[in-house]
Image (cartoon, rainbow, N blue to C red):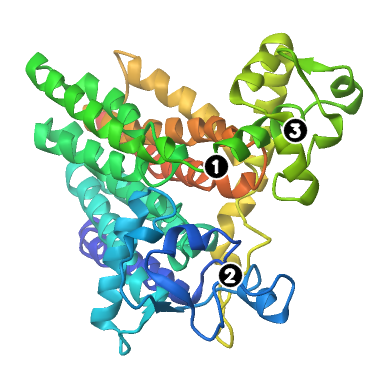
Amino acid sequence: MQNIHKKLEPFFYHIALGVFIALSLLHLLTGYADNGDFSRSVGFLFEKPHDFSTMWPAAESEEWRRRFFSEWHDKWVFLQNWPNTENFFSVSSYKLYLLSQAYLSTLIGAESSYYSIISGSILSRLILCAVFLTIAHHLRHKVSNIAAWIFIAIFGLILIDSSWIAFLNSFYEEQIAIVFLPLLGFLLLKFCANQSTKTGFGILLCAAFIGAAKTAYFYLPTLSLLFLIPFISSKKELIKLILITILLQTVSLLPVYFGKYEKINSYHALYFGALKVLPNTEASSIQSIGGKPVFHECIGVSAFSPLGQKCMETSNASYADVVKLIGDHPSVGFRMIAKLFEEGRATRLEYLGKGIKNTPNFSESTVFNLWPKFFAKGLNYFILLALLAASFLLVKKKSLLSDKEKSVLLIGAFFAAFGFSQYIVSLGDGYYEITKHMAAGNYALALSLPFIFAAIISAAHRFLFSKRNSE
């Protein structure tokens, strides 16, 4: 019986991998509609979507309603001379990635004058599937079969979830995190095994690429270094990696330095964030912050609304005002964190359409929407407890976990740490579009689970099996 199991197990192992990859390919027609942010990412490459008269149709017109929010559009018209660096609206590593996708699209597409989002997304899908296969193979041969199976089951469900995979068919900068965070996890896993400086450099380079995609990810190189340090025994190698981190951290800060939305973001942080969590009676009692008057009619008002424009100019809000408010009223900080965890229970961007006109759309199928249900039931609270448990097991000298299982657990702790830190960083824009701003954070929290469960269940299985054999 045991021999039959050994012969069949590899067969089912490869079937499971194939099933998840095949299901993920059903999302070739799943994407996200534009909320108005696409132009800042694509202005240096594209003139407009195909079959539209302009990038910005007249507000509330029929063409505008078709262009934004309701559906996404696959074909985009290239500028006559692309790339046009004069149209670089913002600094982001995503632009480099999009440029590579654009060249790929022209190579495999029939019409060189149009860019196909679907064609361009093939690169992202190949990276994700390759990382999925590579990590599963690594766990199977370096840790245990049970670790590989746990990873396949949980990561496979992440790979087919429409809330995250839809980013691949869009121009949102979040897709860099969706595609490259799993790769970063694999590189960390590899570094735990070989402690190679080259692998360490690869980790920091990957972290910097993700960090430079969006201002909220800027600190990822430094966070990655903190998880490398326990494995570096040579002082010389440590100094090398620290110097590399300083250089790459500077690169990751470029989107922050050249950011054009600081005034909007700081206004949202105060009036759409810190002040918004207070009950009306308590908020009305705060007349000034650091000598600046508080405009109560602006609390909860978006900067993009007609009143919000006036509020933003009049209030002259800054991040320092948020710090002062929390300093004077510490309960604000606790309420903001509590609200973050509640907001973090939503992962679906309900206001953005995922379908493309006149094509089948599988995004609403139950199997592709499991993670929103898990998070709605408070999965982020569970992961916080899992992070605390993982931290305890990592620092405990005597543990059921082998060194290899501890390495796997460390990757889970890394993703959880990044995920929860994203909760905090997302407050840089208050609670405005908070579900979208927390997308990478919740994705990282989900990514922590295949590693945490793989390590712990592998150790428990090994312990029980050895105990049974000893009897």
Q: Quadrant of residue 453?
A: top left
* Amino acid, disc 1: Tyr
Q: Residue at x 30, y 23 (%)?
A: 226
Horizontal relation, residue 117 to residue 382: left or right? left
Tag of residue 176: none
Q: Determine whether label 3 and label 2 are within 8 Å by CB.
A: no
Residue 105 vs 434, above or below: the answer is below
Up-down relation of residue 1 to residue 216 (above or below)? below
Query: Which quadrant holds the C terminus?
Result: top left
Q: Is residue 464 visible in this depiction of the protein?
A: no
Q: State the count of labels.
A: 3
The residue that label 1 is drawn on is 261
Q: State left or right for residue 68 relative to residue 28.
A: right
Residue on which the image places disc 2: 354
Nearer to us: label 2 or label 1 = 1
Q: Quadrant of the N terminus?
A: bottom left
